[in-house]
Amino acid sequence: MLTGLCLGLVLPMQAQKQISAKLTEATVYLRGAALTHTASATLKSGSQEVIIDGLSPDIEINSLKVKANGVLISATEFSTDYLTPREQATHIKKLQDSLDLYQDQLKETLNELTIYAQMLKLVTDGTQNNMSQKEGTVSIADINANMELYRTKAAELQKSIDKDNKKIEKLRQTITRLTNQIKQDETDNSQLNGMLRLSISVPENITTTFTISYFTNMAQWVPCYDINIPSMDKTITLQSKAKVRQVTGLDWENVKLTLSNATPNRSTVAPVFKAWFLSFQRSQPNRYGSVAKGYTALSNSVSYSTDESARSTLEGVSSAPGQNPLVMSDFVEVEDQDIQVTYAIAVPYDIPGNGKEKLIDLKSYDIKADFKYYSVPKLSDETYLIAMLSDYEKYNLLPGEATVTFNNTFVGRTTLRPNDTESQITLTLTTEPRMTVKREKQRDYCSTKHVGNSTTVTQSYKITVKNNLNRTAKLTLKEQYPISNDKDIEVKDVTVTPNATYDKKDIGAVTWDVELNPGETRTFVVTYSVKHPSDRTIAW
């Protein structure tokens, strides 16, 4: 009776179905990404368990959401499958197949080489034995026959050995290249598989699609730009781009990609005041260097690389001869939302999961620019051509590195900082030797006078500017006079000729904004006197 009762309490085993999810959409943030997968399944009515694999092993559990029409999902459980090997990406599989083929060829060639080497040894040993018979005398005919046999067979075998050695060397080089390529392209955690276990109830037989979405920290994008300046009389083209990388454990294939400048997964609690208690300050070394605002100089020495160019497939779109070329800007939609700016890309993308950057073109903008020359002869003998970009606020630009091309010549790299408070983005393009600037001390106006216990030193500098260009040019010229924060040092009789456009007395900097005609020469003079005790020396 007890046995029968126990058997009567046994419940039927719950049905279980395993399906694979396909990544369809990815919204990549400056830090992190929201991924969306879909997985279709035909289900019978009743309570059952569905296992969905093919997910990233690195996810924020609290962000996980699952939905499916016609199905009641009563429980979810996410785990990492360390046992089931994941299918390799197509290009990795092709590389691995090639590697296996060449390794087999190498093994066969090494075996063949061993056989040829053994045969050569047999021929050599046999010939030596025949030539050194202890009984009797070896006839001349026998010697000639042995020599001819050795010459023919040994030469043939040695030729085969040399051929195999060359083949082995080439095979090993190819194997090394393939191994390095696979090591570079494969995802570090490609062997791990994110797996979702669902407990569901199905009212009736149904074919449905599960949609799984979650957030992962293992992806990011970085804005960057190409600035093309055809000439000073044409509009600047600013091409915004994105460097996208991910190590989610998945190779994103044919994915609908959206980029966002939002920063999710951070504290969203607004700050509040706490009590502010005053105390005496303890002296601490300054850990940070000062940052000086000024013109953004370009650098040709900054390292910049992308592992591969952006590659995409425009299905159903062709560009026949004579038509305008297709550009990515036409396939990117920018949406300025309340808390973020998004770039929805109509072209599906492949993003490898090995962390290699994919460089993607976004929107292209024509931006108005003003040009002028800039010189600070006290600090540099060079005169620089400056481009000033205006009205950039309306393009929702983000801080990022920019490469600059001027007149079809690569100029260098700079960093755009559109979130600065300046009204313009200023770029240093190149030096211009035809805008000559010469700074010299006017010794006839310089003097040192001693009166009582005081010494007064008068200095005067003349700056001569000549426009050797064949066009009118704007020039910003800067010079400096000293200021004092010591009561025993007095700076007086500062004269600036002609009057400066700007005179920043707090730092003693004067600026002239002038326009020079072709061939025109102008002079600018700054004179000042410094009075100090005669027994002390000024550190100029």
Image (cartoon, rainbow, N blue to C red):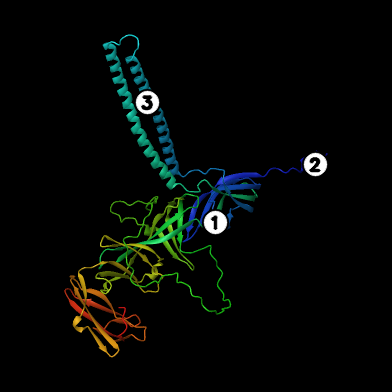
In this rendering, the answer to whether 531 lies above or below 291 is: below
Q: Secondary structure at mark 1?
A: strand
The residue that disc 3 covers is 117
**Quadrant in the rendering for residue 361:** bottom left
> Looking at this rendering, what residue extends furthest in the left direction?
519
Q: Secondary structure at mark 3?
A: helix
Q: Which mark is residue 5?
A: 2
| Residue at the image position 35 percent from the left and 12 percent from the top | 134
Q: Position of residue 145 (x, y in %)?
A: 28, 14
* Neighbour tally class for label 3: few under 14, some 14-19, many 20 plus, Cα within 10 Å: some
In this rendering, the answer to whether 385 lies above or below 90 is: below
The residue that disc 1 covers is 214
**Does the image show residue 274?**
yes
**Quadrant in the rendering for residue 96:** top left
Between marks 1 and 3 in the image, the one whose residue lies nearer the viewer: 3
> How many angstroms separate mark 2 from mark 1 (CA)?
46 Å
Q: Amino acid at mark 3?
A: Ala
